[in-house]
Image (spheres, grey):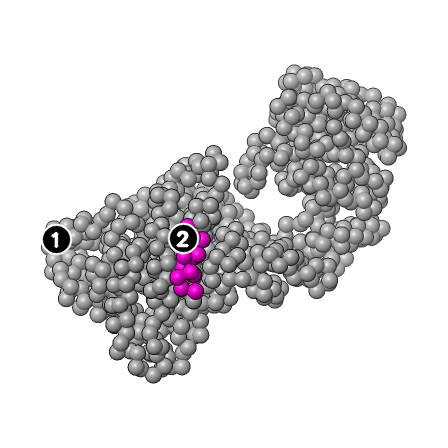
Amino acid sequence: MQVYFFGDGHADGSGSLRELLGVKGAGLAEMTRLGIPVPPGFTLPTTLCGEVIRGGGLPAELDTPLDVAIARLERAAGRRFGDRDDPLLLSVRSGAAAPMPGAMATILNVGLNDETVEGLARQSGDERFAFDAYRRFVHMFGNIALGVDHFYFEEELSDALRAARVLDAGELDVAALRRLVSRYRDLVATWGTTPFPDDPRAQLTAAITAVYRSWEGERAVSFRARRQLDGGAGTAVNVQAMVFGTLGEVSGTGVAWTRDRQTGRPGLDGDWLPNAQGEDVLSGDRVPLPVRGERGEDSLASRLPDVDRQLTRIATLLEAHERTVQQLEFTVERERVWVLQAQPARLPMDAAIQAAVDMVHEGLIQPADALQRVDPERLRTMLHPRIDPAAPRHLLTSGLAASPGAASGIIVFSAADAERYAELNIAVILVRTETTPDDIRAMRSARGIITSRGGLTSHAAVVTRQMGRPSVVGCRRMHVDAQRRRLSVGEVELRQGDPITIDGDSGEVFLGELRLVPPRLTDAYDTLMAWADGFRGVQIRSNADSAVDAGFARQLGAAGIGLVRTEHMFFKHNRINVMREVILAQSAEQRRRALEVLRPFQVEDFVELFEVMDGLPVTVRLLDPPLHEFLPQRTEDLEELGARMGISARDVRRIATNLRELNPMLGHRGCRLAISYPEIYDMQATAVFEAMALARARGIDVQAELLIPLVSDPEELRWLRERILALYEPWREQPGMPERPQIGSMIEVARACLMAGELARQSDFLSFGTNDLTQSVYGLSRDDAAAFLPAYLDAGIFEDNPFAVLDVAGVGALIELAVQRARAANPAIRIGLCGEQGGDPRSVAWLQNGVVDYISCSPYRVPVARLAAGQSGARLRS
């Protein structure tokens, strides 16, 4: 059983053994090999973690390797562990394969007892320092290894401070510290699982065991769940010689970044505390000083210039070797720098991009490497306002982070109020139990949306991501009373008009209006995205339903519009009632008259889209959802609509009832609706052709495509395609118009995948609608599944939400089969994909391997998809 030693320029391990030694242990070994000053020590591997947890302690066969490692450490440090005169003290820290800051245990000053503390006092020349270190050790060891609650130690410390009439433990004299240590030991004897051990070797064994066991502690388990980290490997344990930052003003502790932590620009950055050690920094009781000051500001560099030079040399050496921005934890012991840990720095998105691009220009890395340094999912944070980090905040509640960005505004509870306030240029946050398609106009008017129900694939989540509106869904502690215009969370009640702020990145909702920081795209961002475009092998289009969305998508690099949801165009205030007349029409002729009123609106919308996307493809999906979604929900609204049309209230209710379906997503919608009521697609197709002619007359290069949704049989497609081609005949001879329109089929059900060859023979392109295809393959309702999918994810039955991450094994297998059959039948076929999964980086990486020609996602996910495709392409070429 191997223990991995590091010290005196030699290390048994290396940076490549991250899974075995953890990120910290591998880093310590690698820094030792580089000649960076690291306190000597040894690492116990991750492979021991499960054995220690199951067995309740260290295995007996570890005794001899541990003795050998301690002896080597004593030689490297020049001190002996447990020596009464010149004791070697040890730190025991965790270190998993993935960084988990603050999630697991650390125990410092192992080896102190009533005898060695006197030796430490003589060795350091500072008795107060020695007993303060002893106090800290008994507290940490008693809490972590022996289970004594922090409360008891803190209560004793408070009593000691009051008796001495001081505010900080650093002001206690030696006598007070001696008494405090004695009281701490009494607490351990009373409340601990065992009395405090005086034997240093017993202390070390217990400390190592406690750190291993902290892998299964509540903080660590919660951390891994939040970050979706694998819990299988366990943690390593690092034992090191203690170095002290509490030996006066020429000592201290701090954290440094090899580049500016806010901008990513070159130059050492960081904070430090003189005469302090690690927990002093974490406690927040003292305000740290900068490592580098500005304009004479007090700093480490101004106080200890030689220490600054040491840190600069270390930072330069480490960054050149690791070729990433590094974050260092360091201790200064009497003007000598010791590095305790180094790891890749987690910077704000714009800073991470700036650093990656600068490193390419400096010759440290290649563009392909720079792409891998940036997390595509975090890229979205650059495109939305964010809460000012310095803004004070009061948390109201939290839910699921459904759509990124931050927004402030007054609470409103109805669509009408949202639109009314928005017209007055008053920012509003729409609060609903859950949203419906009838809320589209209100969602466009609101700055942000909150719902008390729903998951990440609910209507509110999907639509707000499409719109780019921040949203938080599934706030289960929030009770919404829309009728009384109230919401409550526990004892807190808010009324319509009260201000709140939501953070769609964290899923948090705050009281009051907080300061927001506007989004900003940098030159470095443009450079990085250009590199990504050079590597990707798939086109990235955007879903957009308006010229504004299309323009924004084009600005973000979309190569066209892959999906125009025409149904969203009907929800505007001057159109929705006309659309409802279409639905309530008693005859085809009455329906055509109402549709003719809508046609000019459609033409206007399409012309605007074609102008914005001049020269790029625009795929117009003809009407898809079931008709009942356009009807109002309340009885009085239905009756008012009937009165306008001269229909009795009874007939209105009867029609609305008849339109409702048990499973509308698999019912009378899409092409099925068009076959029943062909005049609907007649109007839409004619509007597209008229808009093409008008736009072309203005010199616009129109690349329009018509997409027929929910096809499951080739005969459906043939019937509708022939009708659309017949409608096009009058337009074919007009100047600049193509010989025929481009017509495609949307593949959203399993049978369409199996019939893809037949569909391809009649199509210019195919488009996979993965939202509905996933529902079809799984037999799951996307909205209803939100209630039980979390249990599947928690139990490990599903690794990912299939409505967020493409199910490659199931849905993906059908897509591959369909693509194979389609291309065999029609080698010229163009194949695309639109759906929520089209903006997921893992899904994009799979899709871009020749599966489809283009991916279409919401405008705000276009950069995410571009970068993910570029990363995947770069990996394939390497």
State the residue lying farthest toward the bottom. 735
Q: Quadrant of residue 578?
A: bottom left
Residue 137 in percent (x, y) is at 73, 28
Residue found at x 30% / y 50%: 665
* Circle 2 residue: 770
Asked where in the image residue 601 lies, by quadrant, the reply is: bottom left
Q: Is residue 298 left or right of 857 when viewed as pictured?
A: right
> What residue range appears in magenta?
814-827
For the residues carrying marks 2 and 1, which lies nearer the camera in this image?
2
Q: Main secondary structure of the magenta part?
A: helix
Q: Residues within 10 Å of mark 1 (few under 14, many from 20)?
A: some
Q: Does the rendering let one see residue 105?
A: yes
For the image, the number of numbered tags is 2
Q: Residue at x 84, y 42 (%)?
A: 9
Label 2 amino acid? Answer: Thr
455 relative to 297, above or below: above
Which residue is identified by label 1? 651
Residue 110 % position (x, y): 76, 27
Q: Earlier in the sequence, mark 2 or mark 1?
A: 1
Residue 152 seen anywhere in this rendered image of the structure = no
Magenta-drawn stretch contains 821: yes
